[in-house]
């Protein structure tokens, strides 16, 4: 991770004067002790990496002038659809899958989910988890967190749909996903038979990740890592 990289939801065009506040400002000033006139890196989660100079510091914000910017090509859509698990497992899942290249998280109430919704505070904290992971791993794109309805209300998905299947006859996860893919994982107790039928109704294919039964966050992380590797492998051959 770059020692001084900060997130700000701004276009970050060269010449802009931008304000960094709250946690990012505290890290900039209190932790890293950045001095006026020093340069740092800024990211906006939309593929932009900017170099900026610290111009001023007040009690509530630090102002920086954007010196230059570079733009990165958008990632191939890799959507992790997750039936709501316990919050501690969701934290781990979002952190690791952000590092591995997930572009969106679709969170939905599973029939066996202990919780059926998230509070605004919980969503804000999950967003902060993704931001921290994005900065730590050097990514320039911040995954979106989308709250979805239960599976029975889903319509046709925009990309091929895969889901974890522990049955003996399930195919091993493989293939190439040049246009994008969605991987669905159940909560701690897994999908119900009804949900498996719903996934198949949507054109979903059950795939095996391991010979053992994985915890919900382990399964999602393993799938994300494998899909990212297959995508990277396919790009290397192109």
Image: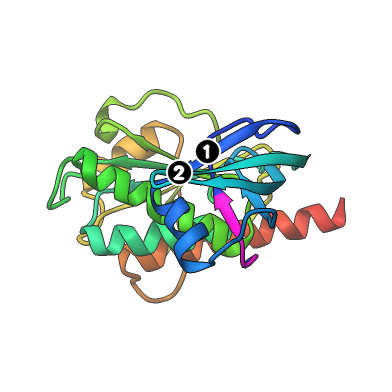
Task: Tell which of 214 and 166 is nearer to you.
Answer: 214
State the predominant SS element of the stretch in magenta. loop
Magenta span covers which residues?
2-6
Q: Are marks 1 and 2 in contact (CB under 8 Å)?
A: yes
Quarter the N terminus occupies: bottom right
Residue at the spot of label 1: 19
Residue 196 coordinates in the image, percent (x, y): 30, 45
- Left or right, residue 119 beside residue 161: left
- Left or right, residue 89 beside residue 11: left
Graded by Cα atoms within 10 Å as few (under 14), some (14 to 19) or many (20 or more), the crowding at tag 1 reads: some
Query: Please, what secondary structure does the residue beneath circle 2 have?
Result: strand
Residue 170 visible in the snapshot: no
- Left or right, residue 51 beside residue 159: right
Residue at the spot of label 2: 61
Graded by Cα atoms within 10 Å as few (under 14), some (14 to 19) or many (20 or more), the crowding at tag 2 reads: some
- Left or right, residue 212 beside residue 40: left
Q: Is residue 90 above or below residue 46?
A: below
Q: Residue at x 47, y 58 (%)?
A: 132
Q: Residue at x 54, y 67 (%)?
A: 32
Residue 6 coordinates in the image, percent (x, y): 56, 52
Q: Is residue 116 above or below residue 16?
A: below
Colour mapping: rainbow
Residue 52 coordinates in the image, percent (x, y): 69, 46
Quarter of image, res 93: bottom left
Task: Tell which of 206 and 12 is nearer to you.
Answer: 12
Magenta residue check for 91: no
Query: Please, what secondary structure does the residue beneath circle 1 have?
Result: strand
Cα–Cα span, label 1 and label 2: 6 Å
Magenta residue check for 3: yes
């Amino acid at each position: 991770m770059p020692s001084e990289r900060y997130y700000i939801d701004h276009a970050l065009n060269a010449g802009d004067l931008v304000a960094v506040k709250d946690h990012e400002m505290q890290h900039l000033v209190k932790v890293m002790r950045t001095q006026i006139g020093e340069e740092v890196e800024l990211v906006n989660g939309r593929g932009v990496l900017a170099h900026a100079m610290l111009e001023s510091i007040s009690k509530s914000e630090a102002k920086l002038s954007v010196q230059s910017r570079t733009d990165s090509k958008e990632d191939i859509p890799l959507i992790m659809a997750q039936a709501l698990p316990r919050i501690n497992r969701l934290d781990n899942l979002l952190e690791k899958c952000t590092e591995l290249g997930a572009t969106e998280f679709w969170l939905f109430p599973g029939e066996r989910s202990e919780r059926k919704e998230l509070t605004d505070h919980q969503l804000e904290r999950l967003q902060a988890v993704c931001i921290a992971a994005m900065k730590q791993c050097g990514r320039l794109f911040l995954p979106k967190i989308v709250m979805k309805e239960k599976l029975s209300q889903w319509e046709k998905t925009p990309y091929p749909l895969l889901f974890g299947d522990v049955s003996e006859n399930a195919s091993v996860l493989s293939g190439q996903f040049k246009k994008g893919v969605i991987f669905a994982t159940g909560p701690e107790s897994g999908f119900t038979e009804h949900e498996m039928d719903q996934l198949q109704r949507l054109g979903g294919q059950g795939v095996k990740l391991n010979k053992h039964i994985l915890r919900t966050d382990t399964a999602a992380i393993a799938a994300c890592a494998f899909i990212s590797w297959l995508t990277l492998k396919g790009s290397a051959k192109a």
